[in-house]
Amino acid sequence: MVKNNNKIDFKHWIFDLDNTIYSANSGIFDQIHKKMGEFISSNLNVNLKEAKRLQKKYFIENGTTLHGLMINHKIDPKEFLNYVHNIDFSIVKPDEELNDLIKKIPGKKIIFTNADISYVKKILTNLNLNNIFYDIYDIEKMNFLPKPNMETYRKLIAKYNVDVKKAIFFDDIPQNLLPAAKLGLKTVHVYNSKLDEELNGRSKKIDYMTNNLKDWLKEWTLNN
């Protein structure tokens, strides 16, 4: 952790999903990255090398590859999501110790993700985390304007009547945490070694850093 400030009585706990609630080593994103490359290659009529270049470029510049494709190529978001999320979800396994920690958290727990609701529900089912979260704020509820767009954070805060001084947000991508920090939420960077180096790193604006969510929640539980 970066700062010892665990005594806040958080009313809203906001979690990214991928590489935050479950490990970046699960293999899910290896499948998705492959499917993204195929989709881009086929729909833009470019070779796979160029498709991979665009995939990374749009992700870094736009928050998601999808948003870059929508802006630059008018790609149908639902067509894209249906294709890239047609994967083997069974490789995601529950961590019951982490699940118990999440269940014991007081206050409202919300998933805030650039994925779509169908994908989120499949992941949560395999993690044994169904019916644990108050709500899922997914890419469709964002009108396909993904993190880290500031307006999306403001809409989330308004929708759930979040008191920013009593809210905390967890994400594996530092740039997704910075808008939340600017708005007054406490922020936790769940470090992801597989993240593109252009998006990784540290910031003094982020309150805490941990190698995994379970360790952070264990420490918070001990202090509270």
Image: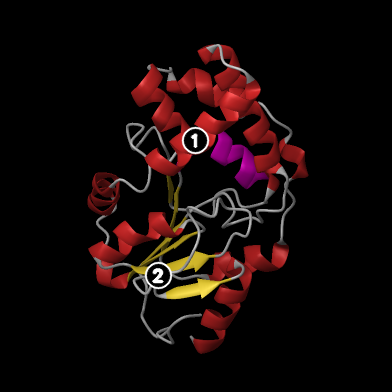
Residue 101 percent coordinates (x, y): 60, 70
Disc 1 residue type (three-letter)? Ile
27 part of magenta stretch: no
Callout 1 touching callout 2 (CB < 8 Å)? no
Q: Which mark is residue 117?
A: 1
How many angstroms separate mark 1 from mark 2 (CA)? 30 Å
Residue 58 percent location from the top left of the image: 44, 35
The spot of residue 52 in percent (x, y) is 59, 31
Rendered position, 219 above or below 89: below
Return the residue nearer the eye: 128 or 187.
Answer: 187
Residue 84 to residue 10: above or below:
above
Prevailing secondary structure of the magenta residues: helix
**Residue drawn at x 59%, y 13% as measured from the top left:** 42
Residue in the image at 26% along x and 49% along y: 150
Q: Residues within 10 Å of mark 1 (few under 14, many from 20)?
A: some
Magenta part of the protein: which range? 114-125
Up the image or down, 31 lies above or below 111; here it is above
Element type at marker 2?
loop
Query: Which residue occupies the foreground of this view, 154 or 101?
Result: 154
Q: Which residue is mark 2?
A: 203
Q: Position of residue 205 (x, y in %)?
A: 34, 71
Identified by mark 2, the residue type is Ser
- 48 vs 55: above or below: above
